[in-house]
Image: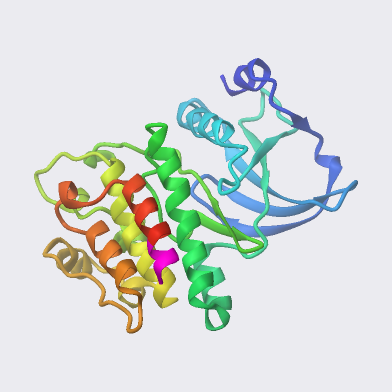
């Protein structure tokens, strides 16, 4: 099925021998990722090893279709093609844009002390703008957290996650993303789906993290924290944060989804607030 999709959509196929200097970057939600350069040119790439078996191939194709739709967006990690796809082999490499500063979490850890408020605001504008653009196309990300947001030359690069909009019985988030997950997904005896307002909640927490430079709740990922979040506990506003900014993210992480602003509203307000501050 994946082979047919590659041919039907005329996806560019690379030869593995075109790349060198491959270095493992780590494991992601789909598989291992590697840093590599092409033998010709100076551009760096990320090679993502993925399984193309029938169990996940529909989700994978859906993910790649979304990537292709937004491939020209400056704040979306670009998809260039695949490496050496062989029908008899259920694995292949996706050729992706490489982000030189790693994840948002890594970027903030390394650069935060040198960031001005204007720098933080610029990151925030990029984040809310790209999520707003997704929502304009009726696309829910569903997995926004510091590891699905990369930074390349101070530019936000959004990664997609292909298991979105799953019912709660299928929803099994990694504990590390508990603080970024819409609390409704943890409520007992409630069948919920990740939706646009779930993305808004995640964005609210991420806006706080950009202003603080640290993980919410000190990187606590315990079940006890989940219980506290469900009961309404949130992080405290960082001193000297502009009022428009803190008011916006506290609205975003409201426990009641209907009280959260839309992403288009978030984008407009953060842009206006930056002009006034």
Q: Quadrant of residue 211?
A: bottom left
Q: Left or right: 105 with respect to 185?
A: right
Say if the magenta span includes residue 93: no
Q: Position of residue 182 (x, y in %)?
A: 25, 53
Mark yes or no: residue 177 visible.
yes
Residue lying at 54% horizontally and 77% vertically, measured from the top left: 115
Above or below for 226 versus 49 = below
Q: Nearer the viewer, residue 250 or 80?
A: 250
Residue lying at 73% horizontally and 28% vertically, measured from the top left: 12
Colour convention: rainbow
Find the residue positioned furthest to the front.
276
* Number of disc labels: 0
Q: Nearer the viewer, residue 101 or 17?
A: 101
Residue lying at 28% horizontally and 42% vertically, measured from the top left: 194
Q: Left or right: 178 with respect to 65?
A: left
Mark yes or no: residue 163 visible.
no
Magenta span main SS:
helix
Above or below for 83 versus 256 = above
**Span shown in magenta:** 273-277
Above or below for 123 versus 134 = below
Quarter occupied by the C terminus: bottom left
Find the residue positioned furthest to the right.
40
Q: Position of residue 158 (x, y in %)?
A: 52, 50
Q: Position of residue 247 (x, y in %)?
A: 26, 67
Residue lying at 30% horizontally and 42% vertically, measured from the top left: 196
Quarter occupied by the N terminus: top right
Q: Position of residue 208 (x, y in %)?
A: 35, 69
Q: Nearer the viewer, residue 262 or 178?
A: 262
């Amino acid at each position: 099925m994946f082979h047919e999709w590659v041919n039907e959509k005329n996806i560019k196929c690379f030869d593995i021998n075109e790349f060198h200097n491959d270095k493992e970057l780590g494991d992601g939600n789909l598989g291992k990722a590697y840093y590599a350069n092409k033998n010709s040119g100076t551009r760096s790439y990320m090679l993502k090893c993925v399984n193309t078996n029938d169990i996940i191939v529909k989700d994978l194709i859906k993910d790649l279709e979304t990537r292709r739709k937004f491939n020209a967006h400056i704040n979306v990690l670009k998809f260039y093609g695949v490496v050496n796809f062989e029908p008899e082999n259920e694995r292949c490499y996706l050729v992706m844009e490489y982000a030189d500063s790693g994840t948002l979490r890594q970027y903030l850890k390394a650069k935060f002390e040198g960031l001005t408020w204007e720098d933080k605001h610029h990151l925030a504008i990029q984040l809310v703008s790209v999520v707003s653009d997704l929502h304009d196309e009726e696309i829910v990300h569903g997995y926004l957290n510091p590891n699905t947001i990369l930074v390349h030359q101070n530019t936000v690069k959004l990664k997609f996650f292909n298991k979105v909009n799953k019912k709660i019985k299928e929803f099994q988030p990694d504990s590390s993303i508990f603080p970024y997950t819409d609390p409704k997904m943890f409520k007992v005896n409630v069948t919920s789906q990740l939706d646009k307002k779930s993305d808004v909640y995640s964005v609210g927490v991420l806006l706080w993290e950009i202003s603080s430079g640290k993980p919410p709740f000190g990187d606590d990922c315990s079940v006890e924290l989940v219980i506290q979040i469900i009961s309404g506990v949130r992080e405290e506003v960082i001193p000297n944060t502009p009022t428009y900014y803190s008011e916006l993210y506290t609205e975003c992480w409201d426990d009641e989804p209907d009280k959260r602003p839309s992403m288009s509203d978030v984008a407009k307000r953060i842009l206006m607030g930056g002009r006034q501050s």
